[in-house]
Image (cartoon, rainbow, N blue to C red):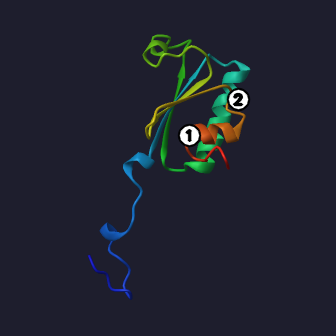
Amino acid sequence: MKTNPTKPAPPEAKPHKAASDHYILRLYVAGKSPKSVRAIANIKKICEENLQGRYELEVIDLYQQPQLAQGDQIIAVPTLIKKLPLPLRRIIGDMSNTERVLVGLDLRNEAS
């Protein structure tokens, strides 16, 4: 498709973010423990700074919904699961190591 250089390209011709650019995250926590509270605050901050408008974050309290732990094979909390975009990733801990979380979410290369 040729475009006129004096006119902006029509929306369908512009590069667009792929559907895989939308992140679906699930954070498993255990009640209001200090680690759980820290993990929630840290991942929300990371998401707002790096994925603004491109993520869904579901926080699951295993004290309230213990049956959900088996489906995602949760063996430690807090655990963050990146469901989309693939590949699926798991990050365990309070999400305080921002660089590690960004690498785990494929938002940064390990070498960066």
Question: Is mark 2 in CB contact (under 8 Å) with mark 1?
Answer: no
Q: Earlier in the sequence, mark 2 or mark 1?
A: 2
Q: Is residue 83 left or right of residue 4?
A: right
- Residue at image location 45% in from the left, 36% down from the top: 87
Circle 2 is placed at which residue position? 38
- Residue at image location 45% in from the left, 11% down from the top: 67
Q: Amino acid at mark 1?
A: Leu
Residue 83 seen in the current view:
yes
Q: How many marks?
A: 2
Residue 92, horizontal then vertical, whole percent: 62, 25
Badge 2 crowding class, 10 Å Cα cut-off, few under 14, some 14 to 19, many 20 or more, is some
Badge 1 crowding class, 10 Å Cα cut-off, few under 14, some 14 to 19, many 20 or more, is many
Residue 48, horizontal then vertical, whole percent: 60, 47
Q: Tell me which corner region of the image, top left, top right, bottom left or bottom right, holds residue 14.
A: bottom left
**Residue at the extreme bottom:** 6
- Residue at image location 48% in from the left, 48% down from the top: 54
- Residue at image location 67% in from the left, 32% down from the top: 95
Q: Tell me which corner region of the image, top left, top right, bottom left or bottom right, holds residue 9.
A: bottom left
Dot 1 falls on a residue whose secondary structure is loop
Q: Quadrant of the N terminus?
A: bottom left
Residue 44 seen in the current view:
no
Q: Is residue 79 left or right of residue 112?
A: left
Residue 73, horizontal then vertical, whole percent: 48, 16
User: Height in image: 73 above or below 25?
Assistant: above
Q: Amino acid at mark 2?
A: Arg
User: Height in image: 9 above or below 105?
Assistant: below
For the residues carrying marks 2 and 1, which lies nearer the camera in this image? 1
Residue 83, horizontal then vertical, whole percent: 45, 33
Circle 1 is placed at which residue position? 105
Dot 2 falls on a residue whose secondary structure is helix
Compute the Cα span from label 2 to label 1: 18 Å
Q: Nearer the viewer, residue 69 or 101?
A: 101
